[in-house]
Amino acid sequence: MKTLDGLWGGVLVLGGVSVSGFASTDLPNEADFFADQPIVLSVSRLAQPVSSAPAAVTVIDREMIKASGFRQIADLLRLVPGMEVTWAGGITPAVTYHGLSSIYSRRMQVLVDGRSVYNPAYGQVHWRSLPVDVDDIERIEVVRGPNAAIDGINAFQGTIHIITRPAADSRGTALGATIGDRRVGDGSARHGLRAGDWDWRIQAMTRGDDRAEDIQDTARENSFSVRGDWRPSGRDEVNVWLGGTRADWQASMIGLPLTNGQTTNHETAFGQVRFRRARDADNEWSIKLEHSETFVDVNFPIPLVNLPPLTPLTTPTDYNHWYKRDALEFDLLARPRDDVRASLALEARRDEAWSRNLLSRESPVQGNIYRLSGSAEWLFAMDWMLHASAMLEHHYYAGTRLSPRLALNWRAAPGHSLRLGVSRAFRSPDFLEQESDLRFTVAPFLLDQVMLSPYALRPETITSWELGYVFQSSARGLRGDARLFRNRVGDIIDLGAPYPVPGELAGDGADITYQNLYKANQVGLDLQLRWQPERETWMVLNQAWSDTESNSAEYANSDPGSVTSLLLAHRFGHEWSASLGYYHVGAMSWVTSYATTPSYDRLDLRLARDWKIDGKRWEAALVLRGVLGGYDEYVNHFYRLEPGAQFTLRVGWN
Amino acid sequence: MKTRARAGMRWLGALALCALAGASVGARASMWVSLVLSEPSSVHLQAAEALRGDLLQNATLVRGGVRVTQRMADEPAKEQPDLVVAIGVRAFGKVLAGAGDTPILALLVPRLSYAGALRQAGPNRHPTSALYLDQSYARQLRLAKNALPDIRRVGVILGPATAPLADVLEAAASGIVDLEIRHIEGPDGLFPVLDELTGRVDALLLVPDAAVVGRGTLPSLLLHTYRRRLPVIGYSESLTQAGALLSLYATPAQMGVEAARLIRDLAPPPIRFSAPSHPLQFSLSVNGGVARSLGIELPEEARLRAMASGEVGP
């Protein structure tokens, strides 16, 4: 009752009507009917309907995440048509879309709650150190295809948006633990509460495993994250995110050969604040400030060559590096006319990186990026929508570039839409690609120049044409889409021929140089289908075929040709549920691995029970991984996924 | 001379008296409606103004004409009108508590509060009736069913304040949809119940109850139902803006106009009320963004309006 009165006070103040009421103040009065309510499902919070989106979008929702049984975020991307996920050892997951990638995948933009987590300095995404628990993800939206105009810098092959649950959605306490073979041991604790006008979610997590049996890749991450949401008024919202991870990994983190005995100590922290004002359900603006920094200590405890009677050679024994990012962004979403929706974004960003040995300099490198993006959607005739967007970016290496996108949507019949689109994007070189300078020296002699970036690099380019078809038949619970595409990729930056370096004792020049070297043409077809024949059963089927031609055999072979995934789930009664995940990836070659990873078939099974005792919700799940047998997931049998099992127990209460 | 003047004076006096008598008879013949407002907020003032405006505009339809006065519930009452229109729950309570047997029409008072106020006041000499603030539940459910033809089950969560609505809701739903009603004691009980309901029903109907739709719980409720792709039916324009798929409601002005018509039908005094009823008038608002996002193709607004009007029911 006391709480009710408090809430009543809130409702009444909002409504601008004060009612002291007759003695029984519990019953609703006119203030409740006319009270002002906060805009909750604002335009930016609503998932864009797939049928009218200007690009092909795949949504992985919580149901799918649970049914998959995956405990690592990178693995969830297997549920997107055309995406390949692999692990080069337990520390290095790689995620790419239709090939064209090494295990340090640098051509996708990845955002967590709007914050880019792509490493701007050394070009990759540290999936393992994201301070996000799989259980905390609200949904993942993947845009397949270049989407620079909306998603900003580095949205080259596609964009992965990871959206975490709002604090208000995670009230109460939840604990979880997972154990499994390969020394899998995870724990998580989450608490959501309302304090005054704020909704808070605090979460801590530890995750560890030892994936490959024959190489050293023991990993453990400990992370925490905090999210706070405040609604000072019905129209305004303030969100605060903070988090950090400390990881201890036994392996290297840069694009250089793995060495036994390497250890990596990886620490990352971030903070982000956003203020959003929703004028009404269609119009809102927001302003956001973020800061993130990552420190990585990569050490080789094994001493290197010792050549008596010369003094022991000093060689770089660490690849220590750090990078920082600061960004300020303003976004506007509006509906200036009934038939037009528009958006505008302005961003100023500063990247900074340091590595004494990789870049051979004591001082950090830094650069500023400015971005202006705009988009408009015009429903110019009934059933016809034109979408135009562009990003103007000034990048410290790439200069000023324009990335446009144009798409035409036609609603051919209720439940059936066609889309024709073209889009262009650029990928600017990262610090490592442009400034690398790794050398072995014995002062004052230069023994060997290992890596160098002697050229001023141009950004990579991609132009993508696509024809899409989206259908939905609610009567049979069936929906899906198809995407036929053609990509022209140019100026691909990769490791090239030796470059003469005067005074180098080894005499072979810089072994590895970054250059704009290759082009590639791709064609392909992505299909995805979701079917829910009845409330208790659903399935998601993804199939993609693609073919890549390139003046680099390696890039041509990086395309697996065919990728399939199937997720099927069924609920038995109130408590038991079971699901099955089947994955097939064709033979492909990860760039700079100089070997072919054979095709594989994988089947995972999950059996779970959720029940309630005394107001506590329990969930127990058993996941059997690789039921069809082990397979090589990278170049040789050292990188092998073996069949195994894991067991998870979760409990939650309010 | 003096005699004639006096006679003239007497004639004048008599005429004056007759005129006065005639005037006072005329005054007695015009109906005196007193509007009593809970407070001078825009919601109450709009209803009062719409009521007075419509009543006076069509005053000729009332035999003897109409006189309308307005006061706040807190002001002392020194009047004996033919009819009191109590605008707002507090005004209704105050007028009920007053002496006398003036008929009272409750306006902008929800169904539950009307019954509650009567219980509170105990035995009473005032005849009363109401034009309920809530839209008929049968109409809301019928609209939901017409707008989303695939739905079979609608869920409703009732808190302690709205628990008595359960019977009304069941009666309203019969023949239209299956209803799943859940009761909670307070906001803490909301999420377990929501979790359970979201798998079982095809839409959620909101009723104003602070435990369910309070400031602290509404955002979580809408986020939760959105995530489960469960459409929400609201009862106000601002709920639609907040994220409900559609809402059915009557604005204060619409209530005022409808009350005026009701009064015209009841006039002239003595007033004999019929049973309290839900409004015939309504407004409809739809959240296009939520509809698109959930992949719901709603009929055009004009068709929705046509579906909603028609018989009112419980």
Image: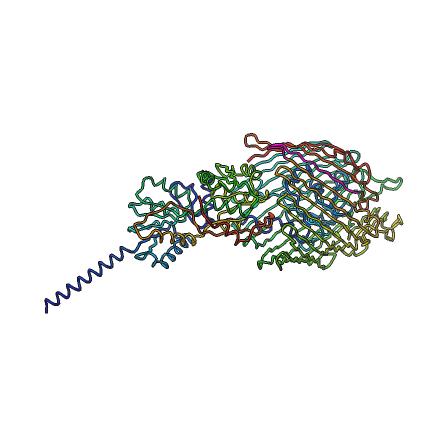
Q: Residue at x 65, y 36 (%)?
A: A570
Query: In the rendered structure, which segment of residues is drawn in magenta?
Result: A571-586
- Is A543 colored magenta in this rendering? no
Q: Tell me where residue B188 appears, x and y as whole percent.
A: 51, 37
Judge whether residue A224 can be spotted in this image. Answer: no
Number of on-image labels? 0
Can you give x and y, in whole percent of width and height, for residue B55 in the image?
36, 56
Residue A151 screen position, x and y as percent: 67, 52
Q: Quadrant of the N terminus of chain A?
A: top left
Residue in the picture at 50% in, 38% down: B181
Please name the colour scheme applied to the rendered image. Answer: rainbow
Q: Nearer the viewer, residue B137 or A355?
A: B137
Q: Quadrant of the C terminus of chain A?
A: top right
Q: Is residue A102 above or below residue A630?
A: below
Which one is nearer the viewer's eye here, A654 or B280?
B280
Q: Nearer the viewer, residue A326 or B38?
A: B38
Image location (x, y in percent) of residue B64: 30, 57
Q: Is residue A583 magenta?
A: yes
Q: Residue furthest top?
A: A613
Secondary structure mostly seen in magenta is strand
Q: Which residue is more in the foreground, A547 or A489?
A: A547
